[in-house]
């Protein structure tokens, strides 16, 4: 947050209008001047027909699920290796998340696994552009076309990212970016949905703002799923967002430069595979994902992580921990899927399709499970205000640990071969990864 954001907030404070939304027909159904300007600027910058701001991308994903018309019992193909809302969004409308596996290079949904999960009940795919790298959209869109599926893009971690020269977010039907504190740019909490589809934009706006009061006046014939929440962004947040948005391109460049430097340093170390950027794509490096081989390094991933962290300053306050293991446990291991209890106590929506049993067992998505348990290491340091010198400090620590792996293994024999995932509370709180 700089002087520009502070000035923008003061201007709104002095206007006295901190939010201008009205949950009824009229000019303020779409929010106040700053909200509408923020949406216009974002849409114009990337050539999206519509941008619809929301108070979080979690709200935005729920609105997207509603807008595309998910009904109870509809199956929605999701990634298990992502923030929980990428899948729970389906549950709010009675949709059933069906998890497909991820690609071991991009960590995004694998088109082959998506195809294998399709049933006559499948209606949509929620694609996540994980860590800021685009999913392979062309084959995914082709599968969707063939099976008449809607595609929602969770681009929370990937604002401003390109796939084969085109901006991600609205390559499918509808998508969105997160503006929470941990993301590239933020408004405290917030999100921006984008779409090229007029009808989906209208339906999203209805769901954002008490749509039941307005759908008829807007001439929306199919009023299903148009009952609304209050997912509105305030004028204060929009004013901050407008200033933050100006910084986005520079932030992305910084992250790409820091990551390129790390790629060069870490790419020389046998046992570490730095992140790849697919041809024609850009990478937003929300975090820097390294694949780790315990066998080649000669240390368990958790002992390696502890040893690297011991070489670096301890994070203060909300500073990020330099290295985190595993990212998230594949989502189907969480109780909502293990016990199949989401809405009420009788198993809705998992029990909605009689005779169908949903599989959330271990082994369902072997690549995601392997990344979580064995291979994935995340470095969240590739961001402003850190510098190339900071990247060198990190790479030096990694090098020192790998060069002294045998000594470290000898000193901590119990931990040298453990397969436990090291997630101290502090690392979770401070990882800066959501
Ligand atoms: C952050 C995040 C979300 C949720 O965004 P909020 O704005 O915090 O609600 C959804 N999906 C992914 C992949 C995220 O990283």
Image (cartoon, grey):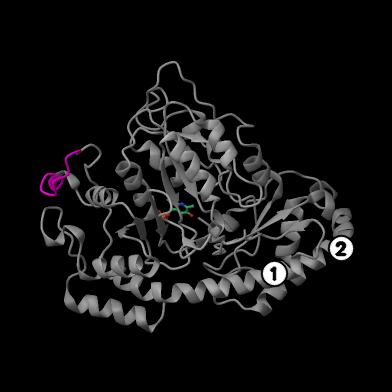
In this rendering, is residue 121 above or below 49?
A: above
Per the rendering, the mark at residue 404 is 2
Specify start and end residues of the magenta stretch as a single range: 213-222
Q: Residue at x 16, y 57 (%)?
A: 29
| Disc 2 packing (10 Å; few <14; some 14–19; many ≥20) | few
| Residue 150, image quadrant | top left
Chief SS of the magenta region: loop
Image coordinates of residue 13 in percent, x first then y, are 22, 76
Question: Residue 80 vs residue 54: left or right?
Answer: right
Image coordinates of residue 228 in percent, x first then y, are 22, 45
For ligand 1, which image quadrant applies? bottom left
Q: Is residue 278 visible?
A: yes
Q: Is residue 313 visible?
A: no
Image coordinates of residue 123 in percent, x first then y, are 40, 34
Q: Which of labels 1 and 2 is toward the front?
A: 1
In this rendering, is residue 288 above or below 345?
A: below
First in sequence, mark 1 or 2: give its number.
Answer: 1
Question: Residue 317 vs residue 74: left or right?
Answer: right
From the image, tell me which residue sits under label 1: 262
Q: Residue at x 70, y 60 (%)?
A: 274
């Amino acid at each position: 947050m700089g002087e520009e954001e502070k000035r923008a907030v003061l201007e709104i404070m002095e206007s006295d209008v901190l939010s201008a939304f009205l949950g009824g027909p009229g000019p303020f159904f779409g929010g106040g001047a700053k909200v509408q300007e923020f949406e216009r600027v974002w849409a114009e910058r990337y050539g999206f027909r519509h941008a619809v701001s929301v108070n979080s991308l979690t709200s935005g994903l729920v609105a997207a699920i509603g807008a595309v018309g998910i009904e109870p019992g509809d199956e929605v193909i999701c990634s298990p290796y992502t923030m929980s809302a990428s899948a729970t969004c389906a549950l709010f409308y009675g949709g059933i998340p069906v998890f497909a596996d991820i690609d071991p290079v991009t960590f995004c949904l694998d088109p082959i696994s998506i195809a294998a999960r399709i049933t006559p009940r499948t209606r949509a795919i929620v694609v996540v552009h994980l860590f800021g790298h685009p999913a392979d959209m062309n084959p995914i869109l082709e599968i969707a076309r063939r099976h008449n599926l809607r595609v929602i893009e969770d681009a929370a971690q990937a604002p401003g990212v390109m796939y084969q020269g085109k901006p991600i977010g609205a390559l499918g039907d509808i998508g969105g970016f997160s503006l929470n504190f941990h993301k590239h740019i933020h408004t405290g909490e917030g999100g921006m949905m984008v779409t090229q589809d007029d009808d989906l934009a209208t339906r999203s706006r209805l769901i954002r703002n008490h749509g039941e009061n307005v759908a008829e006046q807007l001439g929306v014939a199919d009023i299903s799923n148009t009952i609304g929440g209050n997912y509105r962004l305030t004028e204060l947040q929009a004013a901050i967002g407008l200033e933050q948005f100006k910084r986005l391109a520079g932030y992305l460049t910084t992250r790409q430069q820091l990551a390129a430097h790390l790629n060069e340093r870490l790419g020389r170390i046998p046992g570490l595979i730095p992140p790849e950027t697919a041809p024609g794509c850009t990478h937003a490096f929300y975090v820097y994902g390294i694949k780790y081989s315990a066998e080649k390094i000669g240390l368990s991933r958790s002992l390696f992580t502890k040893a690297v962290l011991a070489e670096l300053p301890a994070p203060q306050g909300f500073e990020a921990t330099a290295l985190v293991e595993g990212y998230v446990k594949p989502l189907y291991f969480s109780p909502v899927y293990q016990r199949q209890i989401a809405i009420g106590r009788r198993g809705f929506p998992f029990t909605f399709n009689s005779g169908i049993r949903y599989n959330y067992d271990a082994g369902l998505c072997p690549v995601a499970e392997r990344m979580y348990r064995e291979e994935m290491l995340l470095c969240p340091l590739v961001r402003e205000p850190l510098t190339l010198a900071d990247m060198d400090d990190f790479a030096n620590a990694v090098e020192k640990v790998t060069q002294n792996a045998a000594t470290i293994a000898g000193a901590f024999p119990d931990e040298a071969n453990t397969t436990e995932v090291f997630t101290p509370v502090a690392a979770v709180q401070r990882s800066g990864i959501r």
